[in-house]
Amino acid sequence: MPQSSSSSKKHGTDQPDIGGPASKSQRTKMVKSSDDTEKKNLAKKLKELEISVPIVYGNIAFWLGKKASEYQSHKWTVYVRGGTNEDISVVVKRVVFQLHSSFNNPTRVVDGPPFELSESGWGEFEIVITLHFHNDVCEKPLHLYHHLKLYPEDDSGPMSTKKPVVVESYDEIVFTEPSEGFFSRVQNHPAVVVPRLPAGFALPPPVPLEDADKRRRGDTKDHTLSQWFSNFSEADELLKLAAARQQVQAHIATLRRQLSLIDGQHQQLKSASDM
Amino acid sequence: MDAKDILLGLPKPTTTPTPLGHQLLPLPADKKSRPPKESQRKPDGISREVYALTGGLAPLMPSVDVNHLKRRAQSENEKITWQWLPFTSSARKDNLQLYHWVRVVNGVPPSGDYSFAKYNKSVDVIKYTDDEYEKHLTDPMWTKEETDELFDLCERFDLRFIVIADRFPTSRTVEELKSRYYSVCRAILIARAPAPGDIAGHPLVKDPYNISQDVERKRALSMVLSQTKQQERRDAEVLAEAKRISEARKAAKGTDELEVPAMTDTVPDDNDGAAAAVDSLSPSPNAQFTSGAIAPPVSEIASTLASLRMMRVYLRTHALEQMVQAASSSAGLRTIKRVEQTLQDLGVNLKPKVPTKAVCAEHLELRKEILILLNLQKQLQYKEAEGSSYRDGLYAETPGTPPKRVQRAVEQDRTFVPDSFSFGGERMGKRDQKRKAPGRLLEGPPSPAQSKRPRKFKASDG
């Protein structure tokens, strides 16, 4: 997992140092003599890699209780956040939330983190969330679809104004064939999962984003709604999957044995009847 | 007289002497026999029939708030009357005086031209002089009279060539008329232009009307439109097959490490060869059956990987969906349902709740392994059915009957499968005999081969 050091500071001062200090002198020699081939190798290597950003998107809805009117019975917030509540604005430039046409200006654009939108209403509908990425990341936008949920699943009990309805989905954005600039810019960012480059590959220093100075706090670790965020752990699912695979593999082995047994028996029968 | 009254009759008909003799006449307005009408009142504001359209119930949510509707402006300040007045239209060339209702405000009728006159548009058809005709427009196929007639009709009918073709005195096709018209226009344009460069950009000059191309295009269009459904389907199939094959070949070229099945190499690239490709592909899945149907999806998986890479950005859940589809591409709907049922039995989510790279990879592998498992089960059934026919010696006696017996045995076995695939150990056979599942056809009249060998074989694990 990437460390949480700020990338721009580190790469401003010296060359990115992936190998140990001992190989540094070797590498500088290599860089001078075979610059071209190394560039090509780097480009080829980058083409095979993928960078992924875990995200969680969904909504939290509070019933307004006494203050509820016919058309505004709930206050809800729809959002996209980093999987571990890190700042995804390193990758995401802006997010567009497309609401139901009965809302005023149903196309809501959020230009910076936290990428969320709060509204009040009474109806549940599908929200199209479009993620636009920075220019060096990807030119195509990505669409997410979330069904806004206001009412609890079970009708049991009265609705409470204190306990909201929360629906979140975990997913990962995968970027294939990342550009050098993108790779170097995010390789140490906590919100991004970046594979290690093998020793011997050197990256140029990253170019920081245009509006890097006006960055407000983009992570959601201390967000007002963070107490309602779900925890997504892959460990449980991996465990279950591993157990299931074991069972299936055991059955496969059993069946294979049975099949070879039958084959043997058929051979016997066949030769018997031929006589 | 209601139809119901006629059919059921009223409880107390009286006979009344009439000129035609005694007849049964129904009593008028017997209130008890008529069922009471709806006791609820209809809502005011809309008529009863309109209310009934909603099903007789008021809507649950107010659809339109009355406050949101716009009010008609200034209806109080002015006096509105409607008068039957004459009017003229600039679109008419004769001086025909027509009348219509006019909304008069405070005694002042509206001014201006007739409101529909602005729609009277027509095409500017070129007018050539006789001189110009002599110099530029003569043509061996066309007389001057015909050309003049054509242009007159074009003007009258706004270049609607189909109408013009109908009315043309000598029989000419639509394309011929168009060709003559456009070539005349083009010649005039070139002749009248002060310098050739001025009109070089004009569409008529740049792309002149090509009569043979137009004829061909219309012929092709009519062919496409008149295709029968069967032909359409066959064409669509062939094209889809060709597309899949070319994608597979592309993916196979891109990823050298994956082994490509032999069939994709022998397939030619163009559409004409696609028909041959369809034939060559269809028998091969059957031939590959014993290998467990793993080879055909390899090309699908490769092409899916390649297309995902080309997307540059995608969601991992989307990628997993595509890969699952590719891996199950050779499986039928029933098999896919069985895979999903198996996943549920194992307590695994059909779509992972935390789709990380590792989780998705494991999920995909699990699905592939389940497919292998189901295939092996099917193979086992077939082999067992074969085995029972061997034992009865039927195979040696009459080669004709065994295939039928095998098929029947397999059919009976097929319903058996969900029962036999139970988790929790080796005692598969014993558990099944205890079960009384509704799907078991073995309760019915079994074939002799089956009854001799009830699941004893399965209970013994090697």
Image: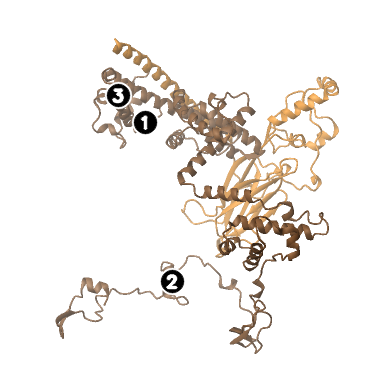
Chain colours: A orange, B brown
Contact between labelled residues 1 and 2, with CB atoms less than 8 Å apart: no
Residue B386 point in image, percent of width and height? 33, 22
Residue type pointed to by label 3: Pro
Distance, label 1 to label 3, CA atoms, is: 22 Å
Examine the image and state in which quarter residue B252 appears: top right
* Local SS, label 1: helix
**In the rendered view, does B17 fall on the left or right side of B262?**
left
Whether B445 is drawn above or below A127: the answer is above
Task: Tell me the subunit letter for badge 2.
Answer: B
Same-chain status of marks 1 and 3: yes
Determine the residue located farthest toward the top in the rendered image: A275
| Number of numbered discs overlaid on the protein picture | 3
In percent of width and height, residue A203 lies at 79, 30
- Pinpoint the chain carrying mark 1: B
Q: Residue at x 64, y 79 (%)?
A: B73
Q: Residue at x 84, y 30 (%)?
A: A14
Report how far apart the C-alphas of labels 2 and 1 lie in the structure: 56 Å
Mark 3 in CB contact with mark 2 (< 8 angstroms): no
Q: Is residue A234 visible?
A: yes
Residue A163 place in picture, x, y as percent: 56, 52
Residue at the disc numbered 2: B51
**Parent chain of label 3:** B
Q: Amino acid at mark 1?
A: Val
Q: Which residue is disc 3 drawn over?
A: B402
**Which mark is on residue A231?**
none
Q: Nearer the N terminus, badge 2 or badge 1?
A: 2
Q: Residues within 10 Å of mark 1 (few under 14, many from 20)?
A: some
**Lower sequence index among marks 3 and 2:** 2
